[in-house]
Amino acid sequence: MSKNVIHTDKAPAAMGAYSQGILSEGYLFTSGQIGLIPATSELAVGLEAQTEQVFANLEAICVAAGTSLKYAVKMTIFLQDINDFGVVNAAMLKHVPEPFPARSCFAVAALPKGALVEIEAVVELP
């Protein structure tokens, strides 16, 4: 099994012992992305802005790997407040076309840097 690291300056740099993404056996596995703006390493302000930035970060990693979110097969969403699900779902509808990937969503006690949302994805290579 091969394992290739994906890195792009168009998504936030890893803040620990992990990669932005790993390509393996025809799939991209992304690390969870929060709403960090790559140029400043600052968190976008507010749920909608953070969610938009999360999808921009995920798409940048996909592009660096030669794929796109349209090929996502699984997404996992972590929310600081489960009541924010509708806002995140609306953003997903703008960034991920049908057929929609399988998806799980969890409310968690806290996210890195006080983020309101974090999303990770498994994306097929076209």
Image: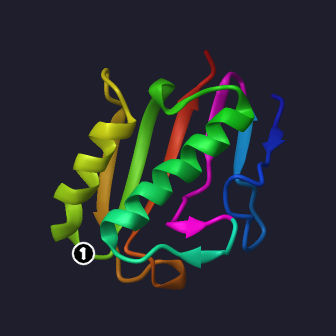
* Circle 1 crowding by C-alpha within 10 Å: few under 14, some 14–19, many from 20: some
Q: Position of residue 72 (x, y in %)?
A: 47, 31
Q: Residue furthest front?
A: 39
- State the extent of the magenta-drawn residues as a range: 24-38
In which quadrant is the N terminus drawn?
Answer: top right
The residue under label 1 is 81
In which quadrant is the C terminus drawn?
Answer: top right
Q: Position of residue 96 (x, y in %)?
A: 38, 34
Instruction: Reply above or below: 119 against 48.
Output: above
Residue 75 falls left or right of residue 60: left
Of 78 and 48, nearer the camera is 48
Instruction: Reply above or below: 64 against 18.
Output: above
Instruction: Reply above or below: 75 against 34.
Output: above
Query: For residue 29: magenta?
Result: yes
Whether residue 119 can be seen here: no
Q: Position of residue 114 (x, y in %)?
A: 46, 84
Instruction: Reply above or below: 122 against 54.
Output: above
For the point 58% across and 52% down, which residue is it?
57
For the point 47% across and 73% down, which residue is it?
44
